Amino acid sequence: MKVKSFVDILGADFYTGVPDSQLKALCNYLMAEYGIDSAHHVIAANEGNCTALAAGYHLATGKVPVVYMQNSGEGNIINPVASLLNDKVYAIPVIFVVGWRGEPGIHDEPQHIYQGEVTVKLLEDMDIKSFIVGKETTEEELSSAMEDFRSVLAAGKSVAFVIRKGALSDAPSVDYSNDNKMVREEIIRHIVSASGSDPIVSTTGKASRELFEIREANGQGHQYDFLTVGSMGHSSSIALGIAFNKPDTRIWCVDGDGAALMHMGSMAVIGANKPSNLIHVVINNSAHETVGGMPTVAGQIDIVGVAKACGYPYAVSVDSFDSLDAELESAKTRGCLSLIEVKCSIGARDDLGRPTTTALENKQNFMNYLSSL
């Protein structure tokens, strides 16, 4: 189905969400049509934020908003759906558009398998009536489903369209770029060189894929790294838990701007505890690049200032490899919690692979290495 037809049938004029590769056609359409526009389209930090923002839109206008997300975001919406939107509370209607990663029978990455199995059930458990949209879905079928949903929405309940892989087509081409010169894979290569045999916790997406391939290219084992292939926004908290329990070992967290924004409260907890053995590197390309390149707000905020306000004793931003190398070496001997923001370009190799070890193998190898330290 053409994405414009999908949008026309929904008939909403306000969208908010977190980008997803399964919804790239929709995301590109919204960026081409509206860009980032408070009246029509806002990319929020996480799916719970989107749901609350949509609720505010409804309260102010009386109209029904759309929240789009990958199905991994269902966990982030459970609280506001149950305690804010639900018709036993405020009866605020929202149309959810959910990218179905890990659909049963469709090959996908390990972090999506279980989420894919429970996607529709979670919606049912939240009392959200759903309709599945696939390549074969016609405009007439979608229009009929939307007509059925109107009475549900009018009763103050929410509905969802679950989008199968390739269901939406004819996306406009949108160029996502910035003026930064440093390439993320090379940034990670410098971190690997500086960290030596220290443990690294890396965030979800291309950063972990690049870290894995760098180890392969170096002829190194993968026991040093915990690849957080899912759980976006939580790698820094995982690193904190390790740092607490391995106080004599330097722990590195390779984070991304979208992930850091998604659960920024973790920075407050890290800063309040000030683990002296944790080095937090935030690679900032101001984009959700792994799922298509749509923008984050990280280009408009002061990440170093946020870190310092949260209690990080040291925080700095770099935009060259010379300054990156100097800061990485200084962080190793500084003896206090440090954050290094690295300004990064958008883009990755077309032939970037994926880890060839399983998630369970990664966990066990990493745990065995930690136990030896």
Image (cartoon, rainbow, N blue to C red):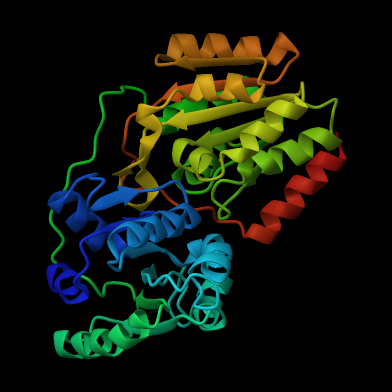
Residue 98 sits in which quadrant?
Answer: bottom left
| Foreground pick, 221 / 295 | 295
In the image, taking residue 342 as reference, residue 229 lies left or right, namely right
Q: Is residue 109 visible?
A: no
Image: 18 above or below 139: above
Image: 133 above or below 326: below
Q: Position of residue 243 (x, y in %)?
A: 78, 33
Q: Position of residue 342 (x, y in %)?
A: 46, 23
**Which residue corresponds to the image point at 23% horizontal and 40% vertical from the top-left?**
176
Image: 4 above or below 264: below
Which quarter of the rendering shows the C terminus? top right
In the image, taking residue 193 as reference, residue 333 lies left or right, namely right
Q: Is residue 211 visible?
A: yes
Q: Position of residue 211 (x, y in %)?
A: 53, 39
Image: 107 above or below 20: below
| Foreground pick, 108 / 234 | 234
**Which residue corresponds to the image point at 28% horizontal and 81% vertical from the top-left?**
134
